């Protein structure tokens, strides 16, 4: 995932990403999503944020796989976070992506 501030976040799964995000940010189009194969995803709002409710959303695949998408996220990255083993730094993520595409 990459946000409007070009912070890349790498998560273990879609469910893991969903647990770290808020509906109001999904409504605002704050994020772009893809998996390691370049499959794009979108935030789908199920219940909008209201005065007394936080809303609900899910992240779902949408569109055609673009193998260059993960690299484009990492090239735009101004900041980075991941709690996955072996992907502690942006350099780790770039190295892993390069190894996958060779």
Image (spheres, grey):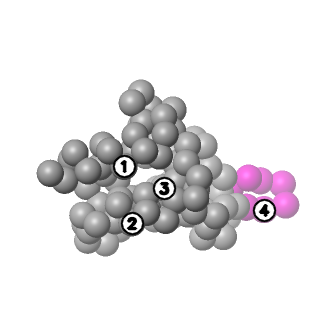
Q: Visible in this render: residue 100?
A: yes
Above or below, 57 against 62 in this view is above
- Mark toward the start of the polypeptide (1 vs 4): 4
For this view, does 64 lie left or right of residue 31?
left
**Quarter where residue 50 is shown:** bottom right
Residues packed near mark 3 inside 10 Å, few (<14), some (14 to 19) or many (20 plus): some
Residue at left 65%, top 57%? 23
The residue to which callout 1 is attached is 94
Q: Of the numbered discs in the image, which one, if any, rests on residue 30?
A: none
Numbered disc in front, either 3 or 1: 1
Inter-mark Cα distance, 3 to 1: 14 Å
Q: Of the numbered discs in the image, which one, if any, rests on residue 1?
A: 3
Inter-mark Cα distance, 1 to 4: 39 Å
Inter-mark Cα distance, 1 to 2: 11 Å
Which type of secondary structure does the marked residue at label 2 adopt?
Answer: helix
Which SS does the magenta portion mostly show?
Answer: loop
Residue at left 36%, top 49%? 94
User: Where in the figure is residue 1, as x and y percent of width and height?
Assistant: 48, 55
Q: Are marks 3 and 1 in contact (CB under 8 Å)?
A: no
Instruction: Pick whichever, 84 or 94, lies toward us.
Output: 94
Segment colored magenta = 49-56
Inter-mark Cα distance, 3 to 4: 25 Å
Which type of secondary structure does the marked residue at label 4 adopt?
Answer: loop
The residue to which callout 2 is attached is 72
* Farthest top residue in view: 85
- Mark toward the start of the polypeptide (3 vs 2): 3
User: Where in the figure is residue 35, as x and y percent of width and height?
Assistant: 34, 53
- Mark toward the start of the polypeptide (3 vs 4): 3
Residue at left 52%, top 59%? 77
Numbered disc in front, either 1 or 4: 1
Numbered disc in front, either 1 or 2: 1
Numbered disc in front, either 4 or 2: 2
């Amino acid at each position: 995932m990459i946000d409007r501030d070009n912070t890349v976040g790498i998560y273990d799964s879609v469910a893991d990403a969903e647990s770290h995000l808020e509906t109001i940010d999904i409504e605002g189009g704050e994020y772009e999503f893809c998996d390691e194969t370049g499959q794009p995803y979108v935030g789908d709002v199920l219940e909008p944020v209201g005065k007394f409710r936080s809303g609900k959303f899910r992240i779902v695949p949408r569109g055609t796989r673009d193998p260059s998408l993960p690299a484009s996220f990492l090239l735009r990255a101004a900041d980075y976070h991941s709690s996955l083993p072996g992907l502690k730094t942006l350099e780790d993520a770039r190295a892993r992506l390069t190894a996958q595409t060779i």
